[in-house]
Amino acid sequence: MAKSMFTNALNIRASREEIVEALTQLPAILSWDKEIIAMEALAGGSYRVKRNASAYVQEELLTIKSQADGVLYQATSADLNYQIDWKLSEDEGSQLLSQELIIEEALNPVVIGIAKTVTKLAFQRMLGAVKQLVETKGEIK
């Protein structure tokens, strides 16, 4: 059974299409997710992802699916299975982008509790990097 860890959200002054492109296209993903050191495209919207040594999961299989209301990432690895559910909605001339982290409950609840705050902050930074990418048209600083 899956468990929602947290949801982060922020407004982005960009089109829905620009945001979806930033979340689904390989060059864009590599520009905002700085933990990724290699990403190999496989069939069916899947990728073999290698992350730097500071990441909790160094290797995973990531499947990216566009949906009517956003984008879904499904990741599997030897250590952890999780989803990031990116939702988009119109909000007074901008887009509200939210990201919900959903993990398998098989993990130790104590580990989940300890990691939750750190992980939420890391994911918040990632969300901010997506915002910066689409609002500055790719000029990540």
Image: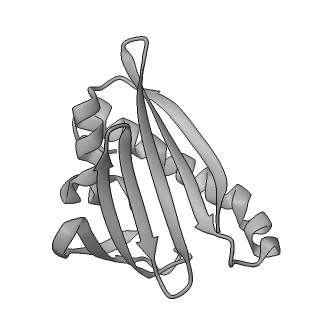
Does any portion of residue 88 appear in the rendered image?
yes
Residue lying farthest to the bottom in this orientation: 78
98 lies above or below 76? above
Measured as percent of width and height from the top left, residue 28 is found at 24, 52
Lateral position of residue 129 relative to residue 81, left or right: left
Quarter holding residue 49: bottom left
Which is nearer the eye, 92 or 71?
71
Residue at the spot x=58%, y=59% of the render?
102
State the residue at coordinates (70%, 77%): 107
Q: Nearer the viewer, residue 124 or 112?
A: 112
Rendered view: 63 above or below 131:
below
Q: Which quadrant would the C terminus be assigned to in this image?
A: top left
Coordinates of residue 36 in the picture (x, y in percent): 36, 69
Q: How is the image coloured?
A: one colour
Residue sitting at x 27%, y 46%: 22
Which picture quadrant has residue 26?
bottom left
**Whether residue 136 is visible:** no
The furthest residue to the right? 110
- Residue 115 point in image, percent of width and height: 71, 66
- Rendered residue at 40%/33% (across/down): 88
